[in-house]
Amino acid sequence: MNEKRLLIAAEIFPPAIGGPATYAATLARELMSRGWETAVVCYADRVDFDGPAKVYPTQKSGGAFARYGRYFKTLWRHVGSYPLLYAQGPVSSGLPALIVAKLRKKKLAVKVTGDYAWEQAFRAGTTRSFLDAFQRERIGGKYGLLRWIERYVCRHAHMVITPSVYLRNIVIGWGVSADRVTVVYNAVPVNTVTETRSAIRSRRGIADQQFLVVSAGRPVPWKGFAILGQTAARLIARDNVPIALFNLGITDVQFYKFLGQDPSITPADQEQIRGLVHPVARRTVAGIFNCGTVPQEELLAWLKAADVFVLNTAYEGLSHLVLEAMRAGTAVVTTNVGGNPELVRSGENGILVEYNNTVELQAAILELCRHPKRRAQLAAAASQVVAKFTMPEMLLNTERLLRTLISL
């Protein structure tokens, strides 16, 4: 019997968008091409997948217990002769997968791309601590339960895979033995945009004299869009820098909400920043443009067109956006948090700043605006970093770990 058999316990799956959905589909397809027999269980009302692997969706409707129950039943029904389950998270997929693995005597690997309990608690306003401080914080109720689940699942899994050394250390801090936590860097897709940088800018109405700064991310508080907007406003008003800041992933309404939630931004500053927010259809030389969610191909085009990519974030496990900007040949400014220092060596292949520090953000952006040769040097050095984040490298390392686990 073929021992290269894997049941992937995914959480989201195409047509849902996002890194986890893309990763699950890519892993299923690519492992099949390498002689594995793979199947996928996921939370979805429908799936869009052209690969040979079987995909078993479970409905997303209902409360948590109903969803988890349906997911558990689907895993139980299809685990069959698969010796190994690979859960794509420690809670929504990890908990049902752990129960099935225990009862059916299967091996379990779990992927951890962040602290789910922290994300949920931070979004709800239950904690104002960022990830590192949250690890030491006492918390009860719903979010305490989520924390207990993710740590329990990881402690009882046969292997935990993380996409960065930073997250590996977080998981070890949960009480998981270090020899069972391994780093496998995610693959970054090749930038398939064939247009030249100037053609992309021309088609989008970006003038040559505009200094194009692009940022992107989910509309969550720790992405720092408000302070980045304040930084852009100060550069425009005080330094006369013709910045066009394009925020991908948030709308004007979400941007204004973040402005109002930040007590460090005065009413006068808010008014000034709001005055610089323009509709995306209107191309002024300087201003702030919030584009909302854009397709992946459009995101890659913006990254290629940008003079600088800025990610003012309080937390990153390992940022795909930073890697995609590096691959696009664009200079990067980001924060010295989480997995970012594993990618960016400040002053060598990018610039690291303190989160929400307008002085450091202004200085970094201004330096790169005034010195195009410096931008080119950083971008050229960054291109060497992405070499180890290729699909063949990711598949080779993942397959090696999964085969080792099956043989134990």
Image (cartoon, grey):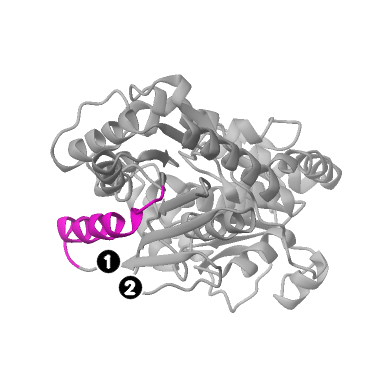
The location of residue 365, given as percent across then percent down, is 67, 44
- Residue positioned 54% across, 69% down in the render: 294
Q: Secondary structure at mark 1?
A: loop
Marks 2/1: CA–CA distance:
6 Å
| Tags 2 and 1 touching, CB below 8 Å | yes
Circle 1 sits on which residue? 60
Residue 396: x and y in percent read 65, 42
> Where is 295 relative to 105, above or below?
below
* One can see residue 65 in this view: yes
Q: Count how many numbered circles sit on residues in the image.
A: 2
Residue 8 colored in magenta in the image? no
Q: Is residue 66 magenta?
A: yes
Q: Quadrant of residue 211?
A: bottom right
Give the labeled residue for mark 2: 45
- Residue 332's disc number: none
Q: Which amino acid type corresponds to the residue marked 2 in the rendered image?
A: Asp
Residue 258: where, in percent of width, then height? 38, 54
Q: If you read the primary sequence from the N terminus, does the residue marked by circle 2 or circle 1 appear first? A: 2
Q: Which element carries disc 2, helix, strand or loop? A: loop
Identified at 33% across, 43% down, the residue is: 116
Vertical order, 116 against 135 (above or below): below
Q: What kind of residue is marked 1?
A: Lys
Near-viewer residue (283 or 143):
143
